[in-house]
Amino acid sequence: DRMLYVAAKALAECLSPDDATKGRVFPHISKIRSVSHAVAVAVIEEAMSNGLNTRISAEEARNLSDFVRRKMYYPEYVPLVEKRTITI
């Protein structure tokens, strides 16, 4: 499947020379957001080149990197319990 190949290629291109010399096949977890972004952009570009995009407007396609960044999930959690300090 071409999209799987494109995703794997984008992932491999995210490896730094240091990662490669250490024998890693995936970039370090600290780069997960930038790697996910690069893979998503590459796969969407491939889908667009095959006419498979049905929900991306021409404006969004021109700014695909920004479009993907806006659609990414940002985990921001609100504390469920108020932290209190007790003094005696």
Image (spheres, rainbow, N blue to C red):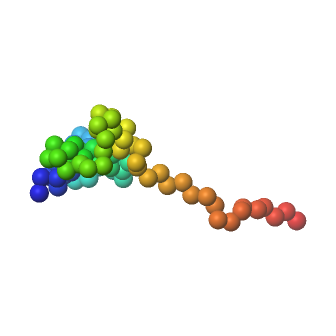
Report the residue at 19% width, 50% height from top: 52
Q: Nearer the viewer, residue 64 or 57?
A: 57
Q: Position of residue 64 (x, y in %)?
A: 31, 39
88 on left or right of 29: right
User: Where does the image place residue 48, in percent across and percent down from the top left?
Assistant: 20, 44
Q: The C terminus lies in which quarter of the figure?
A: bottom right
Q: Residue at x 61, y 58 (%)?
A: 78
Residue 41 shows up from this direction:
yes
Q: Quadrant of residue 58?
A: top left
Quadrant of the frame with the N terminus: bottom left
Name the residue located 35 percent from the left edge and 44 percent from the top edge: 68
Q: Residue at x 42, y 44 (%)?
A: 70
User: Is 28 rendered above or below residue 63?
Assistant: below
Residue sitting farthest toward the right: 88
Q: Is residue 22 visible?
A: no
Q: In front here: 45 or 20?
A: 45
